[in-house]
Amino acid sequence: MSILQLLPFCLLFVVILQGIEQKDNTVSLEVLIEEADGVIQKSITDYIFAAKEAGVVFKAASRLFTEGKNEDSEHYFTKGLQLSPWDMENQLEYAKVLSALGKSEKAKSVARIVLQTSEKQHVLEESAGLVGKKLPRHINLIPQKLKEAKVICFVKIGPVDDWIIQESGKQLSDKLGIPVFIHSKQLPLPLPHRSSYELWSKALKSDIAWDHPYVIQQMKDIGIKSKEEATTDQTLELIARLYVAQGRDDPRVPFGEFKQQMKERDKQWDVSRLLDTLLSAYPVNSKIVYVGVTASDIFSDDNNYLFGTALTGKHYCIYSYYRYTAWFNFERENKNRLLERIHKQLLSSVGFALGVERPTDPRSARSYPNSLEDHDSKGSWLSLECIKGFEKALGHSLPEKTKEESNKGLNSDH
């Protein structure tokens, strides 16, 4: 599929999820309420359109809460969440309003929804607090002396959400029957090694017939001297004119929004350099498998991106959860889905770090995915070859539950 074929699909999600631009805080409360009421009224006849403008309602609700008008704030949060129920940050704000009104049980009920769904550290922490809990801690700092023959040690590379360390570490420990620790030292993230925005800008040019007479004329009108010298804005303007000439809707406004989205996804890091940093910081230890964890986008050589990589059999690997998040994929937040994606990647990366070969069964957790869709299609169970490989590398039998999951996956008709 060409970049031009992909653009309309991507733009659809940008338009839906971009939301309404936040208005300046100097706008009066009366104006915000009037605009919110307009959206609510619009929902009677056009719910789909109104849902796209739910941000206007949330803006009024938040201002009312800030000014202590909690009952009115509850009303507008309710209306906003009827339009956009998967907005976890505003669900959290709604729970705070309910708590302030003394509706503690309802506030806890809403907070539990957020706690089960959100992928964001601060949202999870605040929702847990409203429920009267703390986020669980499963993973301890690695001790100076190890009693076990083999352990796994997570190392943060740059800022990493702690809840991901805690939950994914427990899943990995349970699956492999091996202790998982976290190192107290966080490795600094260097300056980005590459700009994905620049790569995208170049890709935009690849499907344009630059020698076509119509394109040549438009280039002159826009002021483009050559394909190589065309800026991103000039290229987008040229594509927009091609759209209009083909009888399609003018895409200039969504193009601008898509450009902004691409800028937000701009920075990338060379995983080989990050591996070098990991090796330099932590010398080889036959007892420890070091797992570098990063929330940043990684690539290698000519690969546009990677989910993870490993030094096969050398006890070092790195994975990134950047491209697994709802934010990156324009999806609704789903905490369990994110954890499942990470779990499959950890089994793959750690397996390679231990010298376990890739399986041939496409349904199993460590099979090669060509895309995120392939990754999601896999099960979270290990193939028989992987189980044997892990047992040989770790020197012990994997937990019975792990083997039961494998047998169930192998014998499943789905």
Image (cartoon, rainbow, N blue to C red):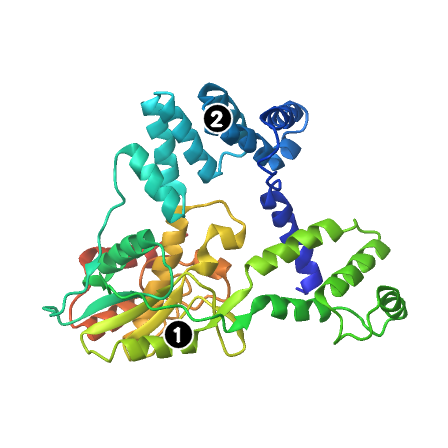
Q: Is residue 303 left or right of residue 122?
A: right
Residue 136 position, x and y percent, is 24, 46
Per the rendering, the mark at residue 148 is none
- Residue at position x 55%, y 60% from top? 265
Residue 414 position, x and y percent, is 41, 52
Q: Is residue 400 left or right of residue 367?
A: left
Q: CA distance from mark 2 to mark 1?
A: 47 Å
Q: Is disc 2 surrounded by few (<14), some (14 to 19) or many (20+) residues within 10 Å? A: few
> Which residue occupies the foreground of this view, 342 or 255?
255
The residue beneath circle 2 is: 67
- The answer to which image quadrant residue 50 occupies is top right
The residue beneath circle 1 is: 274
Residue 235 position, x and y percent, is 75, 65
Q: Is residue 162 left or right of residue 247?
A: left
- Residue at position x 33%, y 79% from top? 312
Q: Look at the image and tell me whether residue 130 can be seen.
A: yes
Q: Are marks 2 and 1 in contact (CB under 8 Å)?
A: no
Secondary structure of the residue carrying numbered label 1: helix
> Which residue occupies the foreground of this view, 95 or 62?
62
Q: Is residue 329 left or right of residue 278?
A: right
Q: Earlier in the sequence, mark 2 or mark 1?
A: 2
| Disc 2 versus disc 1: nearer the observer | 2
Task: From this view, report whether residue 153 is shown above or below residue 165.
Answer: below
- Residue at position x 51%, y 48% from top? 331
Amino acid bearing label 2:
Glu
Q: Is disc 1 surrounded by few (<14), some (14 to 19) or many (20+) residues within 10 Å? A: many
> Which residue occupies the foreground of this view, 384 or 304?
304
| Residue farthest toward the front in the current orientation of the protein | 26
Residue 54 position, x and y percent, is 58, 34
- The answer to which image quadrant residue 363 occupies is bottom left
Amino acid bearing label 1:
Leu
Secondary structure of the residue carrying numbered label 2: loop
